[in-house]
Amino acid sequence: MFLVHREEEGTTAGRIVEDEAYVEHDQAAHSSIGMTGRNRVLFGPPGHAYVFLSYGMHSCVNAVTGREGKGEAVLLRALEPVQGIGLMQARRKTEKVTSLCSGPGKLTQALHITLQHNGVSLTENSLQIWSADSMPGYEPPNEDEIVQTTRIGISKSKDLPFRFYIKGSRFVSRK
């Protein structure tokens, strides 16, 4: 899958190479405390962006995946940049392509995803998720190319094997 952001400034896009799932009754999920004003989008229909600030300064983007009322989503942790790389480099103030989107805060900065995107449809707006066959030259990974492991950077429910990344990708946040 690809995360694509089309703006006047230009289009930026990346192949999703790392993500983490957060499910109902998961103590690490923002939905674990029930619906609040901040996390309401998580309980809405699937296919929408849930954007939040991490540590009050870095935007992070999730795709809501559970049926309405469930509070489930997938955090997009890392992308392989495929379009608008120069624009991403300017935004991130680095030439190093492998570090442009190698973390949830980095990828939102590179693609200019902000709190204003919270709740938008990921199929009908400027911020979209495209299928693997949408970008020529990119094949979806085989099952044996996907590594499943425990999530990182959390203190609760650390033992759940809900982190997924493409084996051998130079663009993941951590090996």
Image (spheres, grey):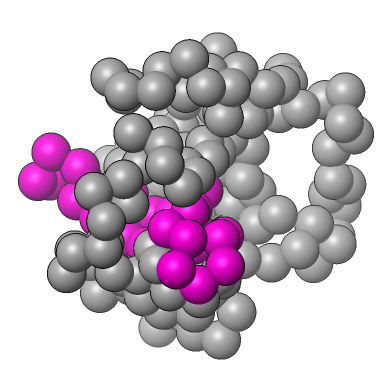
- Taking the magenta stretch, the answer to whether it contains residue 62 is yes
Looking at the picture, does residue 118 appear above or below residue 24? below
The image position of residue 45, as x and y in percent, is 51, 76
Q: Nearer the viewer, residue 33 or 59?
A: 33
Q: Nearer the viewer, residue 18 or 37?
A: 37
Q: For the magenta stretch, what is the residue range?
A: 50-76
The image position of residue 32, as x and y in percent, is 31, 45
Looking at the picture, does residue 51 appear above or below residue 30? below
In the image, is 119 to the left or to the right of 136? left
Looking at the picture, does residue 169 appear above or below residue 11? above
Q: Total marks drawn?
A: 0
Give the residue displayed 88% in from the left and 47% down from the top: 139
- Taking the magenta stretch, the answer to whether it contains residue 55 is yes
Q: Is residue 91 visible?
A: no
Quadrant where the N terminus is found in the figure = bottom right
Q: Is residue 34 visible?
A: yes
Give the residue displayed 47% in from the left and 23% down from the top: 151
The image quadrant of residue 115 is bottom left
Looking at the picture, does residue 19 appear above or below residue 39? above
The image position of residue 103, as x and y in percent, is 40, 34
